[in-house]
């Protein structure tokens, strides 16, 4: 299944055909018999997807250690996470267990992305009708970590859980948010910050769910001509840094875009719930493996380039670093151009 991810196979029959074409090389890859489509289909249906989830978590732990010293663009010692979800559309007739709307099926992949290395640390696959904010109940919150979320996660009882865990959140306020300002802090308008206020929630239920002070920051994005209002429980970081952190939330969107474009998670090899979750977790494992290779070999190549090289060199018997090394050579024909030279010919003759 990892071979299918790396080489863009379209179906189980495609996987079977391509692997049988290189059967003399399969023994060295740990496959001692022929790969059969029925065997893969059966494994997708009956082998518990949690096996692959556990394997992916082991890889994630290794990758996070390797990328622990990476900078994500802002000089902070805190771990910063971006939280978001993406919907993976399915065919209702083939995936009736994932019914989303009357004529549509889908699952939702909730992802917590460590911004140091853009490594997904938590992935939860749910039916698409599960609201994003409920995933906050499943997270193991880290003290002093910063959780960056959009307005879909604005639930004051859950934000207060983050506060009580001694962690921080950065999110956007909704247009109908009631806020009572206690005092304002000095700002530098050249940074785009328009106001920096400390106050409390003014609504009855929001005050009941979040009884402590909260920080409200207004920011104008001159590049896109947009105004933003951020909410955070971090009272110490400069206001422009809070705005910069929220901009980094876009990294999780790029992560979704990358895996949807370059890995197989939009078309599935099986139709059962177990098969879908198995394929998603194997795709995540492949993504993290590529990130580990990039770091361990100190490659300057992008993840996409590494994936492309692996797709054509997967069964080549060579040191892996050799596959990614750029071979510099001098063109032997450079000194002998193919263009003929007319001897004894000068301009004007």
Image (cartoon, helix red, strand yellow):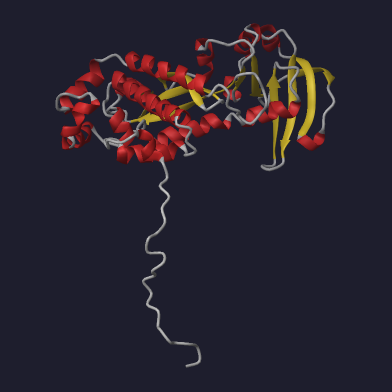
Answer above or below: position of 332 versus 76. Answer: below
x, y percentage for residue 189? 81, 35
- From the viewer's perspective, tell me whether residue 40 is left or right of residue 73: left
Tell me the residue at 72%/41% (across/down). 222
x, y percentage for residue 63? 47, 22
Q: Which image quadrant is residue 162 in? A: top right
Tell me the residue at 74%/19% (across/down). 215
Tell me the residue at 67%/23% (across/down). 76
- From the viewer's perspective, tell me whether residue 221 is left or right of residue 44: right
Could one spot residue 2 in this view of the protein? yes
Answer above or below: position of 334 versus 286. Answer: below
Q: Please, which residue is most extreme toward the bottom here?
A: 349
Q: Which image quadrant is residue 195 in? A: top right
Q: Quadrant of the N terminus?
A: top left
x, y percentage for residue 26? 20, 29
Could one spot residue 111 in this view of the protein? no
- From the viewer's perspective, tell me whether residue 182 is left or right of residue 159: right
Answer above or below: position of 243 versus 202. Answer: below
Q: Which image quadrant is residue 179 in? A: top right
x, y percentage for residue 132? 51, 20
């Amino acid at each position: 299944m990892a071979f299918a991810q790396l080489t863009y196979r379209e179906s189980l029959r495609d996987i079977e055909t391509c692997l049988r074409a290189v059967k003399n090389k399969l023994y060295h890859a740990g496959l001692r018999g022929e790969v059969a489509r029925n065997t893969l289909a059966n494994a997708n249906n009956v082998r518990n997807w949690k096996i692959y989830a556990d394997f992916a978590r082991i890889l994630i732990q290794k990758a996070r250690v390797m990328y622990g010293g990476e900078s994500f663009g802002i000089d902070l010692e805190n771990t910063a996470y971006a939280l978001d979800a993406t919907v993976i559309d399915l065919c209702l007739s083939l995936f009736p267990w994932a019914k989303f709307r009357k004529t549509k099926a889908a699952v939702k992949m909730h992802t917590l992305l460590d911004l140091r290395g853009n490594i997904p640390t938590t992935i939860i696959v749910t039916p698409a009708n599960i609201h994003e904010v409920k995933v906050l109940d499943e997270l193991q919150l880290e003290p002093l970590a910063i959780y960056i979320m959009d307005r879909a996660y604005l639930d004051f009882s859950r934000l207060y859980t983050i506060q009580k865990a001694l962690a921080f959140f950065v999110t956007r306020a909704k247009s109908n948010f009631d806020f009572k300002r206690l005092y304002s802090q000095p700002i530098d308008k050249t940074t785009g910050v328009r106001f920096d206020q400390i106050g409390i929630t003014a609504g009855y239920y929001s005050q009941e769910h979040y009884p402590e002070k909260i920080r409200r920051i207004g920011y104008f994005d001159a590049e896109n001509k947009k105004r933003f209002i951020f909410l955070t429980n971090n009272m110490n970081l400069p206001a422009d840094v809070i705005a910069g952190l929220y901009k980094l939330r876009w990294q999780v969107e790029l992560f979704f875009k990358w895996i949807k474009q370059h890995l197989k998670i939009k078309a599935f090899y099986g139709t059962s719930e177990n098969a879908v979750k198995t394929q998603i977790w194997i795709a995540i494992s492949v993504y993290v493996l590529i990130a580990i290779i990039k770091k361990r070999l100190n490659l300057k190549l992008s993840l996409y380039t590494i994936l492309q090289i692996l797709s054509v060199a997967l069964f080549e018997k060579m040191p892996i670093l050799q596959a990614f090394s750029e071979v510099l050579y001098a063109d032997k024909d450079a000194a002998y151009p193919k263009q003929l030279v007319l001897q004894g010919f000068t301009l004007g003759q």
